[in-house]
């Protein structure tokens, strides 16, 4: 039996302080000290879960961005006794925000005028989230059709059993969640992913959240609290199929 886990990277420096996005490219944005601390706790929690519920070989597939790589490599080391295999796949990268990266909304509008205003106006219109493209970057449709669809097709053929842990970002994880449940990809806008460091397990026709530290909205500092060292206890996923609208 194949088990699929979706893991969103822990809190990055750019999430705690938006101005950090001016110091790093999206690809090089590292985890914050809080994210590193939570990541260590998360890995130990996940290790206890897999040791308690073994299911054969463990394969970790991660985005090649700095923050996801930090989490994935730490998880690989924590699961060394399970001989976890680590694979990097650029299709799991966060959506390319193009010229908007590192800029707040008002800065985008000041720098790009009507192009930025049109972007936000289109995103607010019903059904436009999927097709609205970041200036000089990607649209959610690009992420889904050019990256997530071929990714899922390939790995469904490669893996038939064991544990598959996918470490990625907000938008790709939304599409993975809908794709694996055979849902309309346009519903990804309303598919609230786990918070940073969150882990979800696909069970039948739904997602069960194993770790959830709360969803972190773009540019809003996370709560200053430690991670939870208790063992993983599956519970109903928050904001599951057709769930609440999350931040981008």
Image (tube, rainbow, N blue to C red):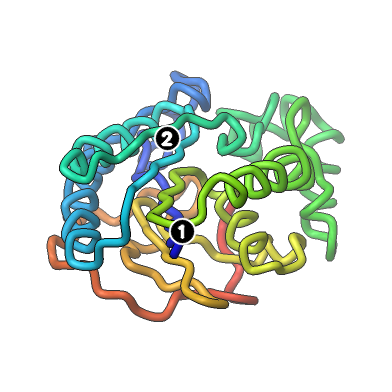
The structure residue drawn at horizontal position 54% and vertical position 75%, both measured from the top left corner, is 240
Dot 2 corresponds to which residue? 14
Place of residue 59 in the rendered image (x, y in percent of width and height, measured from the top left): 39, 43
189 or 117: which is nearer to us? 189
Instruction: Tell me the CA gap for discs 1 and 2.
Output: 28 Å
In the rendered image, the quadrant that contains the N terminus is bottom left
**CB atoms at circles 1 and 2 under 8 Å apart?**
no
Q: Which mark is residue 4?
A: 1
The structure residue drawn at horizontal position 80% and vertical position 39%, both measured from the top left corner, is 133
The structure residue drawn at horizontal position 45% and vertical position 39%, both measured from the top left corner, is 61
Query: Measured along the vertical axis of the image, is residue 48 above or below residue 154?
Result: below
Place of residue 40 in the rendered image (x, y in percent of width and height, measured from the top left): 18, 44
Q: The residue tagged with tag 2: helix, strand or loop? A: helix
In the image as oriented, which residue stretches furthest toward the left? 229
Q: Which mark is residue 102?
A: none
Left or right, 123 with reference to 211: right
Place of residue 154 in the rendered image (x, y in percent of width and height, measured from the top left): 64, 43
The structure residue drawn at horizontal position 73% and vertical position 29%, both measured from the top left corner, is 137
| Quadrant in the rendering for residue 126 | bottom right
């Amino acid at each position: 039996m194949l088990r699929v886990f979706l893991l969103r990277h822990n809190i990055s420096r750019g999430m705690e302080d938006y101005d950090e996005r001016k110091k790093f490219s999206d690809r090089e944005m590292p985890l914050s000290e809080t994210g590193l601390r939570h990541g260590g706790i998360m890995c130990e929690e996940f290790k206890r879960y897999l040791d308690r519920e073994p299911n054969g070989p463990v394969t970790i597939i991660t985005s090649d961005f700095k923050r996801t790589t930090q989490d994935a490599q730490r998880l690989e080391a924590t699961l060394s006794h399970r001989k976890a295999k680590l694979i990097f796949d650029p299709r799991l990268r966060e959506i390319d925000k193009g010229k908007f990266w590192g800029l707040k909304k008002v800065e985008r509008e000041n720098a790009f005028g009507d192009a930025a205003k049109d972007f936000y106006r289109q995103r607010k219109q019903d059904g436009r989230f999927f097709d609205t493209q970041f200036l000089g970057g990607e649209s959610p449709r690009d992420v889904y059709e050019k990256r997530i669809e071929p990714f899922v097709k390939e790995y469904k053929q490669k893996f038939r059993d064991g544990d598959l842990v996918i470490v990625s970002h907000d938008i790709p994880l939304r599409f993975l969640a809908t794709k694996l449940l055979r849902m309309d990809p346009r519903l990804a806008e309303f598919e609230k992913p786990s918070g940073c460091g969150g882990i979800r397990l696909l069970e039948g026709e739904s997602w069960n959240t194993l770790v959830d530290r709360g969803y972190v909205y773009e540019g809003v500092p996370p709560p200053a609290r430690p991670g939870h060292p208790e063992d993983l206890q599956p519970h109903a996923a928050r904001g599951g199929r057709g769930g609440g609208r999350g931040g981008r």
